[in-house]
């Protein structure tokens, strides 16, 4: 089985400013009709990007300076709105793939959908988010590290403490976030247990 552990996630950052960015902005509703997630990445923030172009502005997800970004830095209540799992799927498929998100707070269902993808969401203070955003925008090539084991975001010599529930953190450290992989890895035990259950053996 492929190693699913998430101990440290390292990569360049991308800053996306604004509170209450909902899932419809992350991936517009018209893309929910797809039965697979392939290709969703190119449509991440599509309407916001189009609007920025009309206003003569450059959306961060269109900015070539952030083309190598793998860690997203956001503000408060990111991922609010609908429960669509397409939102984190689109982020994970954009560019090189977002592999971790740092923010002030996250909508609960969005957070859970991220965990199911192995996409850690690290909660830091508003002040630290501001510092990280400024650093990323000043030097898009700088490397961020979401150190789940140490519970801190590392940027050069700086370290920013983040919050993450103990249970979720252990799932990432032990690779237990991937429930499908866990089931497949324990197929023999599942079959043995099923064989001992009378209400299942009747149908064999």
Image (tube, rainbow, N blue to C red):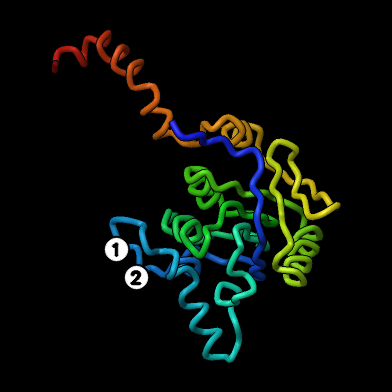
Which x, y percent locates residue 73? 66, 61
Q: Name the foreground residue: 139 vs 86.
A: 139
* Neighbourhood count class around disc 1 (C-alpha, 10 Å): few under 14, some 14–19, many 20 upward: few
Q: Is residue 38 above or below residue 203?
A: below
Which x, y percent locates residue 52? 56, 84
The image quadrant that residue 28 belongs to is bottom left
Secondary structure, mark 1, is helix
In the picture, which quadrant includes the C terminus? top left
Q: Name the foreground residue: 68 vs 58.
A: 68
* Residue plotted at (34% across, 63% down): 32
The image quadrant that residue 140 belongs to is bottom right
Q: Is residue 47 above or below residue 40?
A: below
Secondary structure, mark 2, is helix
* Residue plotted at (71% across, 43% down): 147
Q: Is residue 144 left or right of residue 3?
A: right
CB under 8 Å between discs 2 and 1 = yes
Mark 2 to mark 1 CA distance (whole Å)? 7 Å
* Residue plotted at (60% across, 39% down): 6
The residue under label 2 is 30
In the picture, which quadrant includes the N terminus? top left
The residue under label 1 is 33
């Amino acid at each position: 089985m492929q190693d699913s552990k998430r101990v440290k996630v390292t990569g360049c950052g991308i800053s996306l400013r604004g509170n209450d960015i909902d899932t419809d902005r992350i991936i517009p509703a018209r893309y929910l009709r797809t039965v697979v997630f392939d290709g969703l990445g190119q449509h991440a923030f599509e309407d916001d990007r189009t609007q920025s172009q009309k206003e003569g502005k450059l959306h961060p997800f269109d900015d070539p300076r952030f083309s190598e970004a793998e860690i997203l830095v956001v503000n408060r209540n990111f991922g609010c709105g609908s429960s669509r799992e397409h939102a984190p799927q689109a982020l994970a498929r954009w560019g090189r793939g977002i592999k971790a998100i740092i923010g002030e707070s996250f909508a609960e269902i969005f957070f859970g959908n991220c965990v199911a993808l192995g996409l850690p969401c690290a909660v830091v203070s508003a002040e630290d988010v501001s510092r990280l955003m400024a650093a990323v925008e000043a030097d898009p090539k700088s490397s961020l590290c979401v150190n789940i084991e140490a519970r801190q975001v590392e940027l050069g010599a700086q370290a920013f403490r983040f919050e993450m529930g103990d249970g979720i953190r252990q799932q990432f450290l032990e690779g237990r976030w991937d429930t499908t992989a866990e089931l497949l890895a324990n197929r023999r035990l599942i079959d043995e247990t099923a064989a001992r259950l009378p209400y299942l053996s009747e149908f064999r």
